[in-house]
Image (spheres, rainbow, N blue to C red):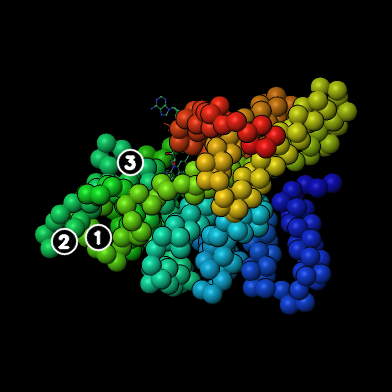
Amino acid sequence: MCVYVPDCRNKRRVADFKAQQREEDAIPSPASRSIEDIFVFAAKAAQRATKTDGDADIAPEIWDDFHSSGLAVSPLPEELGGASLWDPRHGERLCEVLRALGGADLSIARLYEGHLNAIGLVCRYGSREQIEDLAAHVAAGALSAVWGADDAEALTIVSGEGGEVLKGRKILASGAGFVTRPLVTAGGALGQQMCLLDLEPGYVHDISGWRAQGMRATATGTVQFTGRRVGEREIVGAPGDFMRQPHFSGGAWRFCAAHVGATERLVDLFRDHLRSSGRGEDAYQLERLAGCVADATTARLWVEEAARRLASDIDAEGIVAFANITRMVVERSALNVIERVQRGVGLRAFVRPNDVERVCRDLATYLRQPVPDLAMSDGARAFLTSVTPVGEF
Ligand SMILES: Cc1cc2nc3c(=O)[nH]c(=O)nc-3n(C[C@H](O)[C@H](O)[C@H](O)COP(=O)(O)OP(=O)(O)OC[C@H]3O[C@@H](n4cnc5c(N)ncnc54)[C@H](O)[C@@H]3O)c2cc1C
């Protein structure tokens, strides 16, 4: 019986990878070698996920493995030592990585997705010097993140003594305290600007308010920036680049892929429970299991297609509309699976320590993403105003 789900998936994936490599290329590329290590890392992270959740902290040895597996550098361009996973053309491969991490430990998946997103934005909009500088820091162990969420004290760029400075703070910033190369958004005279910062260890942050039911190890909190100098060196791209389409909304498939990984994990755990408890032949449980398989697979297929469409980079409006509807499908599928698994397992699904309990908690929390109603209705409106048949939409 497959008790340790990610490892089982890993073995199959690694085997598939190796077979594919033998066929396509006698010498594996650096990219494919590092991807194999990432799946091995995911399997180890899954084994430690209960402790990570209990401690609300990712242990130093997990970070060591994270770096030595090549995960930290994997978003970087290949010529700078990475696997180019920032590049949407590698979306299919990234989707596998995010699903594996999501199935292993959603907190780690969240931190990795933010790190990759920041590197992607710098690679897309930044200067060569900024890309190389960030790559050097990441290779030396630094983590990045995108800190975009604001409260009433929204971060702005203002004139200060001897140049421009930041005023305000960021909220809901994951990795607060240990991310040292965050990409933050700040209001400037000409619009929203991205700033790639280089923070000193011990910078002012506060994660004491992070009392969420799940995603406890993400160190999500507030970071104060008032008085920090920003110059040309820190400014990435032009005003408005951060929300430029199709990549702003189209990139939502990445967090959806992490959600799918956790949803798939729940389905596998449910099957394990039904088999070990001898309750699997019950007609109602089989109906639940069928629904779970259908929902998890539907969500995966939507996410894979959303990644493919973003990689194609044609029809920006279509890419955005598809990603918006993908968010709806993935959220609904995950909520369906959570409900079926909790009802099918019963009270044990709510008692710690239990992987089902933890994954449900993390997934329910991470599913809360910005403006879901708007994303869904924008997707629907794009179809409403088009004349394309739905089968070609
Ligand atoms: C684990 C975790 C880590 C995170 N890490 C980061 C990070 O590193 N960086 C970062 O920038 N952010 C981060 N975030 C924040 C995230 O990007 C979103 O800002 C946050 O999750 C939004 O959730 P919400 O439910 O409050 O969204 P909301 O957008 O407030 O949605 C809540 C509900 O209100 C509705 N709604 C929204 N606006 C309106 C409106 N104007 N009128 C009527 N209804 C409305 C929505 O459709 C939804 O039903 C993180 C979030 C989580 C859960």
Q: Nearer the viewer, residue 44 or 117?
A: 117
Q: Is residue 90 left or right of residue 252?
A: right
Residue drawn at the location 54% of the way across and 75% of the way down = 79
Q: Nearer the viewer, residue 26 or 200?
A: 26
Q: Which circle's residue, 1 or 3, is located before the other in the chain?
A: 3
In the image, what residue type sits under mark 1? Val
Residue receiving disc 2: 163
Residue extending farthest to the top is 284
In what quadrant of the picture does the C terminus appear? Answer: top right
Q: Which circle's residue, 2 or 3, is located before the other in the chain?
A: 3
The image shows residue 2 at horizontal and vertical percentages of 81, 47
Q: Nearer the viewer, residue 393 or 250?
A: 393
Residue receiving disc 3: 150
The answer to whether residue 307 is seen in the rendering is no
In the image, what residue type sits under mark 2? Gly
Q: Residues within 10 Å of mark 1 (few under 14, many from 20)?
A: some
In the image, which is nearer the foreground, mark 2 or mark 3?
2
The numbered disc on residue 230 is 1
Q: Is residue 204 left or right of residue 291?
A: left
Q: Are marks 1 and 2 in contact (CB under 8 Å)?
A: yes
Q: Are marks 1 and 3 in contact (CB under 8 Å)?
A: no
Residue drawn at the location 33% of the way across and 56% of the way down = 238
Location of residue 76 with respect to 212 vertically, above or below: below
Describe the element under mark 1 as helix, strand or loop.
Answer: loop
Residue drawn at the location 46% of the way across and 63% of the way down = 123
Tell me how far mark 1 sits from mark 2, CA to CA. Answer: 8 Å
